[in-house]
Image (cartoon, coloured by chain):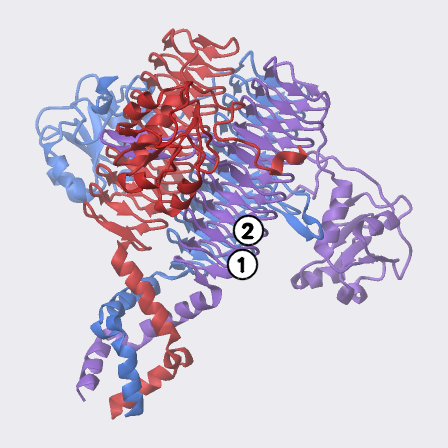
Chain colours: A red, B blue, C purple
Amino acid sequence: MSGVVERRHATADRRFFERAGPFTAEALAEAAGGDLLPPREGGFPEGGFTGIGPLQAAGPTELSFLDNRRYAAALDDTQAGLVIVAKAFASRVPPGCGAIVVAQPYLAWSRVARMFHPAPKARAGVHATAVIAASAQVDASCEVGPFAVIGEGVEIGAGTIIGPHAVIGDGVRIGADCRISAQVVLSHAVLGDRVILFPGARVGQDGFGFAVGPQGFETVPQLGVVILEDGVEIGANSTIDRGSVQDTVIGAGSRLDNLVQIGHNARLGKGCIVVSQAGISGSTELGDYVTIAAQAGLIGHIKIGTKARVGAQCGVMSDVEAGADVIGSPAMPFREFFRNVATLRRLSRRPGVEEGADDSQSEGKGGA
Amino acid sequence: MSGVVERRHATADRRFFERAGPFTAEALAEAAGGDLLPPREGGFPEGGFTGIGPLQAAGPTELSFLDNRRYAAALDDTQAGLVIVAKAFASRVPPGCGAIVVAQPYLAWSRVARMFHPAPKARAGVHATAVIAASAQVDASCEVGPFAVIGEGVEIGAGTIIGPHAVIGDGVRIGADCRISAQVVLSHAVLGDRVILFPGARVGQDGFGFAVGPQGFETVPQLGVVILEDGVEIGANSTIDRGSVQDTVIGAGSRLDNLVQIGHNARLGKGCIVVSQAGISGSTELGDYVTIAAQAGLIGHIKIGTKARVGAQCGVMSDVEAGADVIGSPAMPFREFFRNVATLRRLSRRPGVEEGADDSQSEGKGGA
Amino acid sequence: MSGVVERRHATADRRFFERAGPFTAEALAEAAGGDLLPPREGGFPEGGFTGIGPLQAAGPTELSFLDNRRYAAALDDTQAGLVIVAKAFASRVPPGCGAIVVAQPYLAWSRVARMFHPAPKARAGVHATAVIAASAQVDASCEVGPFAVIGEGVEIGAGTIIGPHAVIGDGVRIGADCRISAQVVLSHAVLGDRVILFPGARVGQDGFGFAVGPQGFETVPQLGVVILEDGVEIGANSTIDRGSVQDTVIGAGSRLDNLVQIGHNARLGKGCIVVSQAGISGSTELGDYVTIAAQAGLIGHIKIGTKARVGAQCGVMSDVEAGADVIGSPAMPFREFFRNVATLRRLSRRPGVEEGADDSQSEGKGGA
């Protein structure tokens, strides 16, 4: 193990990643949706392209990409046989290397990378150790891992993977082609198709609801469910509480990162992004395509408009308009926040202010 | 699954929730502790009330409530057969609907909702796959789920539920009527009665303790335990470290939300609330009935007085007096915080300040 | 269970903790690396020392320590038979008590505490319920707990403990003397020796990577791994995403607390500390011996220099120099942060500022 500290692992090391291919330059260009430029010297490798890698590491039978102009120098020296680039960089591709010219290199890269490394497919079958209730309906094409527990009345669609130790509570419905990773606990929930829950996600447990009685807190039963629409992804160890009277809803295609908290009755629109360690309190509603950056927090019962962007560590205490960019705690427009930062820095640096002399000066001047 | 996006689920959908009842209006009024007013037109349903729901959705055999005057318009149009309301709204109840008039509608609602939907009871029995040490004493009335692991010398009181995959370490004591949810890991701990641990809570692992030695960090053994007093609730994926020399203690009736962190040796009094993603560092002490809002952080070795309230995202670096309301990072009184926000906003808007002209003005004046 | 609220548990209660010993004063002094002073009255206990405890609770056959001068009064009254103290306090040790005089009492204490309570050793053997792939190589000295799942091609070194319900994905390599606690999920990773993962840690899942396509987000395959070098510790429910193209690396001896998030491609140097609920975004690099305090957040693609210290709740948006101390959101030097706090407090208190009169004054003066 002494060698662990060295970086011995190639991108997509075969020890960990399966690989499809090889693919021809033409097939890759088609997948990328770009124009194929052959190398100015020599041709494409006879056997096609066998894999992908970063510019620094890719070899003659591998494909790479340039997305960030900061790394343009690496393009000059790359040994890759084919690169995905924007038009502006096509002329900098080395003579022995082909190019796929596209408008959005990162998007094209994601597609080509998925050709070589498609998402894992269900290997149909139920592990002998899984415990599945008699009334559960699990499609024959599903993969169910060791020690999974599937409750009464559960329905699971075709091609879905249920990982090791996943616990699916009574009545839960899961669509097709979902991936419920290891050690997810899922209850009181309905999932669309292509939903991915990463390890340790907790979905559907009781919301944090209680009334204050004379003897202490009294639990308010949480009687809604969680709805995760098609294509939703929930990160590792994130927690999504079920609704109290209505439902908690995560709109189609929304992606939540790790350690995110979603309170009861919250409703997220389609295509929202919630980055790691952010929290959305109960009954708050997000429109479509809202972005919540890392560690931001939203209080309950507010509305965030479509395409609004909430910055990292932002504390949102009131509604945010559609399209707005806010940051700070309490939240304010980006410009205002950074103007405040600059103002305070300047005021703190004024010698008079620092020494407390400014006050007396003002008074002196006031008396002048 | 295409219909998932539609809201098809009634409150307390029978697919997910068991339901008691029906109950008479009189029985509900008694549970609510309020005065029963019959409908001004017609009478109560013959078969009693069968369920509960929000004002917008409840039908003639269902009960609803109004707690927030913001939703009073929904009261006018409700089809519910019975509503819980405060005195001020009794006259707005539709003529065909009865009323239970109470001082605290939300508290009354919580009680009636628990009549229809009581907390799940243990179904006595140990799943065949559970692994229980020979020396463990598990009451015959307990429910132990699939793949639970219960260590040597563990004691578990009557009526307690141990969920699927829960891991209970050697020597742990758990009182009566507790609920240890799926995939909880619990070690080095003593729990009172009626304690609830939600999925993925981690209780009793080593605190973050080390000394700095010449070769790097050296672990300090963590030799205390975690004590969760009667009625404590710990949210999903929250983490409570055991004490280093003393114990980590969560006082009776305190409720912690999801993703909360409690450091070693921390002591919370009775009836404290700690909202999602807040963190309390080692050896910090909270009095009784303290509220810590979401994402707040408390450094170690400080004291927070009884009934103090710490606002969302607050960073508490020193003691807080009993009854105080603090917010901001560093923490300050609520009034001071919002005054600071207003001051800074105003100063940033002054044209002279924005342009940097204020400094030269000051100098000019200073020289005058 | 009614007695739970009382503090009945001695430090290192034998119900929960195994105990080695007894040890002679001489052996303890040697382990502590200090000078042994016998009691001024009487002698050391005949049978040696049997345990450790805090000054207030330790008895005549137990050892204690004083590290913080705040607790010096407890030294005067201690019943302990032997204490570890700094030179300055040697004269305050009670007459019936011996002393071990050292330069760093806390470090010495950690070593003596580990003599009495060494870290748990693997009890060689695989639990009958564990599921281990045929191609996995698990050293015969390893302990594998109930319901553990170990994938194809996994390699696990001597003396490593795999806890109950741990899930080790295909191809993972784990060194010697590691402790993988209950309900860890580990995939796409290579671990050195003496690595500890606390319960619920998630290591190696997909990073949060996607491109924006015309129909929504498109997943970018995450093709790197996670490397945890020798002696790394990862707290309960923390999440470490694997790299996208390069690897995510945690340097030797670094310790991460609970609920910490590490994004894809992040690289931490040796001996870093990351306290609870802090988050490090993708591709950010930390030098050696960096400290990140609780709830701090670092954006992606920045560099933090060696021995820099990032304060609690700090929001770091740009590079931090080696040795710097920063705090605030956005991050700034400690001194600047507290100067800003003082400035703003003072400005908010100025009556003229509060009333809005300052603006008109300024204008008046400007016109003078």
Residue C236: percent from the left, percent from the top? 54, 37
Residue A170: percent from the left, percent from the top? 38, 17
Q: Circle 2 — which element?
A: loop
Near-viewer residue (B356 or B275): B356
Rate crowding at label 1 as few (under 14), some (14 to 19) or many (20 or more) other CA atoms within 10 Å.
some
Label of residue C287 in the image: 2
Residue at the spot of label 1: C322
Circles 2 and 1, Cβ within 8 Å, touching? The answer is yes
Near-viewer residue (C257 or C280): C280
Residue A256: percent from the left, percent from the top? 35, 35
Q: Residue at x 56, y 13 (%)?
A: B129
> Which quadrant of the view contains residue A340?
bottom left
> Which quadrant of the view contains residue B361?
bottom left
Picture quarter with the N terminus of chain C? top right
Q: Are marks 2 and 1 on the same chain?
A: yes
Picture quarter with the C terminus of chain C? bottom left
> Which quadrant of the view contains residue A98?
top left
* Residue type, numbered disc 2: Gly
Q: Earlier in the sequence, mark 2 or mark 1?
A: 2
Q: Circle 1 — which element?
A: loop
Rate crowding at label 2 as few (under 14), some (14 to 19) or many (20 or more) other CA atoms within 10 Å.
many
Residue B186 visible? The answer is: no
Kindly report the distance in space between the C-alpha atoms of the residues bearing marks 2 and 1: 8 Å
Subunit under mark 2? C
* Residue type, numbered disc 1: Ala
Residue situated furthest front in the rendering = A41
Residue A312: percent from the left, percent from the top? 35, 49
Subunit under mark 1? C
